[in-house]
Image (cartoon, rainbow, N blue to C red):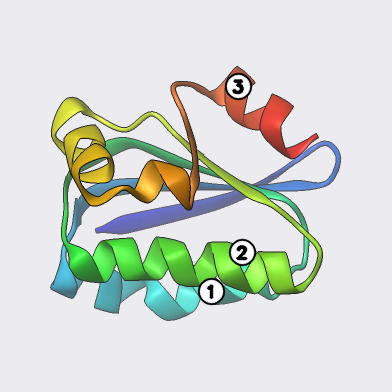
């Protein structure tokens, strides 16, 4: 699992994930993602277009980041989920809890 953090105008944090967001992947990027997304206290978008698999630990990481930002008065939107990952979101009801949208323009609109 790889994590790339960038800053967009606004300022907005953009987290791009690549690989398998399983237990090992979540362990590898968990601290970096929390520091880069939650600690900045800025709105964030998370690009999952490079994520081929997500497990409960990956879901937990996303939920933790979203909750952490909410506690700081900020929002997070997730976009680009591949079909297998999107299916996990739908089956687990996460679309009711997390702000999951199809693409980056929608994500930017959600956090505006």
Q: Residue at x 39, y 75 (%)?
A: 30
The front one of 75 and 13 is 75
Using the numbered discs, state the Cα–Cα distance from disc 1 to disc 2 in whole angstroms: 5 Å
Which is more N-terminal, label 3 or label 2? 2
Residue 66 vertical placement versus 38 (above, below)? above
Where disc 3 sits, the SS reads helix
Residue 47 vertical placement versus 23 (above, below)? above
Q: Disc 2 vs disc 3: Cβ atoms closer than 8 Å? A: no
Residue assigned mark 2:
37
Residue 82: percent from the left, percent from the top?
23, 29
Q: Is residue 112 left or right of residue 81?
A: right
Q: Which mark is residue 34?
A: 1
Q: Is the residue marked by circle 2 packed among few (<14), some (14-19), or many (20+) residues within 10 Å?
A: many
Q: Is residue 36 left or right of residue 16?
A: right
Using the numbered discs, state the Cα–Cα distance from disc 1 to disc 3 in whole angstroms: 23 Å
Q: Which mark is residue 106?
A: 3
**Figure quadrant of residue 96:** top left
């Amino acid at each position: 699992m790889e994590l790339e953090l960038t800053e967009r105008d606004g300022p907005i944090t953009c987290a791009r994930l690549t690989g398998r967001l399983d237990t090992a992947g979540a362990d590898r990027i968990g601290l970096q993602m929390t520091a880069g997304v939650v600690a900045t206290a800025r709105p964030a978008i998370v690009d999952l277009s490079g994520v081929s698999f997500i497990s409960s630990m990956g879901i937990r990481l996303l939920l933790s980041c979203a909750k952490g930002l909410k506690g700081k008065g900020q929002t997070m939107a997730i976009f680009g989920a591949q079909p297998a990952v999107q299916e996990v979101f739908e089956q687990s009801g996460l679309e009711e809890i997390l702000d999951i949208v199809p693409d980056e323009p929608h994500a930017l609109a959600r956090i505006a």
